[in-house]
Structures are given as C-alpha cells and as structure tokens.
Image (spheres, grey):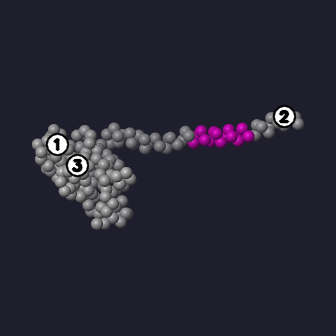
Amino acid sequence: MSKTATLDAAAAKPSFWRRWRFHLSALLLILPIIYVPKYFDNLALSRGLMGLGQRPAGELDVGPWKLKFAEWKVEPPQSDPAGMVKTFTMAQCEGCKDQIRAVYVRVGKPRSLRAAGSIFFGSPHRAFATVPIPPRTAPDAELWVTAEGWDGSVHQAAWPLAMASPATVEWLKKQGASR
C-alpha cells in the first residue's frame, strides 16, 4: 500500500466534518439574531421605557385616590406553585403618594382587610402584584382593589376583569370556567 492512498482515505472524513461544522457555526450566529428583538422588548419593559406594562388597563378611583393600572404582560395566567397567577402593575397619583399605606388586589370581594388579597410592592411610580386566579373564576368576575391610607381609612373599588386583562378572560372562557 502506498503512502498516497493512505492519506487520501484519511482526508475524506475531516472534509465531511468541516462542512457540518461550518453549518453549525452559521446556525449559532443566526439563532441569537432571531431572539434579539424579544430581548430588547423585555429590557425596555423592565426599565419602564414601555410604561407600566405591555397593556395599560386604565385608571381607577379608589376612594379619594386615583390609581393607574396596567397588565404586565399580555398573556394568559401563568402556572405557579400557588396555582394560576397574573401580574399587574400600578402607579399612584402624584398627590396621593404620601397618603397611601398599602394597595391590595384580589379576585372577588374581600371579607375583611386581612383577606384583602395580594399586596402591591415596589415604588409608588410602579408597583407589582401577582394575583392568584382561582380555578372556578367566572369570566365576568371582578378584581377588587383595596387601598389603605396612613390615617387608617380603607377604600375599595371593583374593577371588571374584562377591563383589567382581556387575555385572562379569554383563557377563562377556553377553560370553561363558571360559578
């Protein structure tokens, strides 16, 4: 057997591998480019450049205070160890930032202040609350917002779930939820 025949047989295999290695490296360059727009959208949302959230849900008068709400992400409720949950954001009006002690939100009317629901946490400019969505929630249910003032006053307001999160209402209809 000559040395030339041995070298030609060995050179055929690396050629095949080099070709696939080239395609894999091209794929590794292309895939991040596909996900870059979503990354920058999430970055802008987290920094507050897109407002309170992906979808502004409107303002709500809770007693003497005006609170602005938004849906953090326009998507159905997400699974969590606590069940299905939905995240909302809230901003307080300029004049009421020093008057409000806490703001709570829950599905259905609370029985007392101890059962007021999920508390909004964060700054008065943008606070977050993750609201559990009970399995048997009706699509026409209401979110109840409870605001507690530093003077001890408690105010409540109902907020239709259809206005707060149309994506959640559609998800509830697909689930076939009823009371």
Judge the density around disc 1: few (<14), some (14-19), many (≥20) Cα neighbours within 10 Å. some
Label 1 to label 2: alpha-carbon separation: 87 Å
Mark 2 packing: few (<14 Cα in 10 Å), some, or many (20+)? few
Which quadrant holds the N terminus? top right
Mark in the foreground, 1 or 2: 1
What label sits on residue 125 in the rendered view? none
> Magenta segment: does it hold 15?
yes
- Residue 143, percent from left and from top: 24, 55
Can residue 139 be seen in this snapshot? no
Q: Disc 2 marks which residue? A: 4
Residue drawn at point x = 37 percent, y = 63 percent: 175
Q: Are marks 1 and 2 in contact (CB under 8 Å)?
A: no
Q: Work out whether residue 164 can be spotted.
A: yes
Residue located at (25% from left, 38% from top) = 123
In the image, 47 versus 143, the foreground residue is 143
Q: Is residue 163 magenta?
A: no
Circle 1 residue: 100
Nearer the N terminus, badge 1 or badge 2? Answer: 2
Tell me, for residue 104, which label it has, or none: 3
Label 2: which secondary element:
helix
Residue numbers of the magenta segment: 13-27
Identity, as a three-letter code, of the amino acid under mark 2 = Thr
* Marked residue nearer the N-terminal end (2 or 3): 2
Q: In the image, residue 97 lies at what x, y percent?
A: 18, 40
Position above or below: 169 against 63: below
